[in-house]
Amino acid sequence: MDCSNGKDETQNVRDVIRSAYGQIAKQGGSCCGPESCGGSSAEAVAGGVGYDDDELAGLPEGANMGLSCGNPTAMASLRPGEIVLDLGAGGGFDVFIAARKVGPTGKAIGVDMTPDMLDKARRNAESFRKSTGLGNVEFRLGEIEHLPVADASVDVVISNCVINLSPDKERVWREIVRVLKPGGRVSISDLALLQPLPDRVRESVQALVGCIAGAALVDDTRRMVREAGLVDATFEPKSDYIDQMATWSDPLYRDIAGKLPEGAKPSDFVTSLNITATKPNAEDGLQGE
């Protein structure tokens, strides 16, 4: 990636991601790029990572863009009345599913740094309100490293295939702890590395936009979660998600596979990782920072 234009690398990464996902918001497609994943529908992608028909039924048109690598709303075991925050909400896919689960006494908030995605999500929110009668969703513009959310104000933080895109993942995890109430929960599906990527893949802009090149090692993710102050953490690798990309004729999969050493496949390096954790209660005497 060329950072010779005078911007620091962190801002350059954000600009690349914002531009690519703005294009996805306008044209459709997935993190494979503006084109669909080799003809595989967004519903097929969502079904392949654990969403059931009831969760997918009745969502606003275009909310599901095939950007998932897991089902964090299911892992979170959401309850009526809870306040849920989705990091990198996109068109609102997981926000709308969460909103139905927490019901009219709860709230689902989505944060995204891409204005075009935010516009799409807010249009979808009006459609969602009309079809369900629920007015319990809100979308805010912001970066996940600087969440526009008050301290200790949410019960659950979810995120789906987004933290890997951040150039400052340690700060994201600290922000998660900051906004969670004591005893609050984390439920995140993300991409992570089982071993370092070859330079040819790591330097690919397509692999960055496709959530691969920016992913952290699983061991580094464990460390960041622990150092942020979260406890009772679990990390469940799901490498079969990466293998499924081959059956979708995913162009990102083909691009990465072509840059790997002979005989290697993307799932040797990359996995979907389901992460759950808890912010300690105040009486435990532990601090989130």
Image (tube, helix red, strand yellow):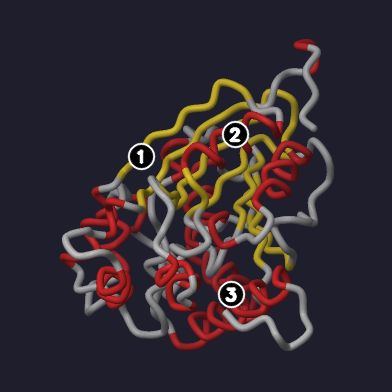
Badge 2 vs badge 3, beta-carbon distance below 8 Å = no
Residue depicted at x 31% and y 80%: 36
Q: Where is residue 261 in the image (x, y as percent from the top left)?
A: 26, 64
Residue depicted at x 83% and y 40%: 151
Q: How far apart are marks 2 and 1 (CA)?
A: 16 Å
Q: Any mark on residue 17, and which? A: 3
Task: Give amino acid for label 2.
Answer: Arg
Q: Where is residue 24 in the image (x, y as percent from the top left)?
A: 48, 81
Residue bearing mark 1: 237
Residue depicted at x 55% and y 40%: 220
Work out whether residue 30 or residue 209 is closer to the camera in this orientation and state it: 209
- Whichever of callouts 2 and 1 sits on the residue coming sooner in the sequence is 2
Q: In terms of secondary structure, where does tag 3 sit?
A: helix
Q: Which of marks 2 and 3 is in front?
A: 2
Residue bearing mark 2: 223
Q: Any mark on residue 218, and which? A: none
Q: Is residue 200 left or right of residue 129?
A: left
